[in-house]
Image (cartoon, grey):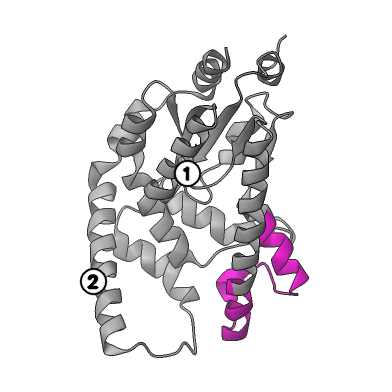
Amino acid sequence: MIKLYDLLKEQVDVPKAIILAGAPGAGKGYVLQGLDLGGLKVLNLDNKYIDYLKKANVSLDLKNASPKERSKQAIAMVQANKSFNQDVIDTIKAKESFILDGTAASYKKTTELKNELEEAGYDVFMLYVYTDLERSLKQNQDRFKKSGGKDRSLMPAIVLRTWNDVTQNYKPYKNLFSDNFVSVANTLEDEKINNLEDIIDKYLTPYKPKNTKPKTAARQKYADKQRAKTSSEIKALLDGGANDIIDSSVSAEEAKSKIKSFLN
């Protein structure tokens, strides 16, 4: 059987880039495992972040971080971003085919990267993995413990915002990538919570940061405005706004077939 990576090696003149999009806990890594892309270079900011957290002796259980640990986390993220961006630059300069394993939460940055890759002669594809908000939060909450402390659990408020951003980006990405786009839905089979307030009470409230510095009046006003906007958008998605994503998504096997066509 010819693997997808073997097809890539036959087309060295046209490097390929596959951009992954999906919230934390969506199961992007799991979906990748079934696509026979094990030999293809994978660039992942999260791996860099974990390495720098370990070097700083910061627990990967980020959802329970102290103020001092949160400060170290921020420094580690700056360091990880710098190293990761250099890896991306070096990979593009070398015309290597690769997978960018991330959330693609920023539509602007993803669009800029797509344009840069195409200008460098790349063919670019997006694999979008959708999951429920509750599954995203639950996977994040359990990740540190299930991994035996080897994998990180983010602050749930960050997961919630990222889930919203990625989900809002679905239609824009589908339009942007056109035929070079496929989505897979990885959702909860059990009954799930669809009320945002209940989700917040269960997954966010227990991990609300303590001993934080008070915001200025202006910053508090801005934060409240952003929180209200995000809540409104998420409620619309929970009330059925995300059904189109699920209905438009395909099986992992169908996604594999479409990626194979892209590599051909």
Residue 223 image label: none
Say if mark 1 contacts mark 2, CB within 8 Å. Answer: no
Expressed as whole percent of the image width and height from the top left, the position of residue 208 reads 46, 77
How far from the left and from the top, in percent, is residue 217? 27, 88
Extreme top residue here? 1
Does 234 appear above or below 59? Answer: above
| Number of disc labels | 2
Residue 262 to residue 92: above or below: above
> Residue at the spot x=52%, y=36% of the render?
19
- Of 149 and 44, nearer the camera is 44
Residue at disc 2, secondary structure: helix
Q: Percent position (x, y) of residue 116?
A: 49, 38
In the rendered structure, which amino acid carries the disc numbered 2? Answer: Lys
Secondary structure, mark 1, is loop
CA gap, disc 1 and disc 2: 25 Å
Counting other residues with Cα less than 10 Å from the Cα at mark 2, is it few (<14), some (14-19), or many (20 or more)? few
Judged left or right of residue 181, residue 172 is: left
Residue type for callout 1: Gly
Q: Is residue 127 visible?
A: yes
- Specify whether residue 149 is in view: no
Residue 111, quarter of the rendered image: top left
Above or below, 27 relative to 179: below
Residue shown at 53%/49% (left/top)? 25
The residue depicted at 41 percent of the width and 51 percent of the height is 106
Dot label at residue 22: 1
Q: Earlier in the sequence, mark 1 or mark 2?
A: 1
- Label 1: few (<14), some (14–19) or many (≥20) C-alpha neighbours in 10 Å: many
- In the image, residue 190 lies at what x, y percent? 45, 43
The residue that label 2 is drawn on is 225
Q: Which residues are magenta?
A: 48-74
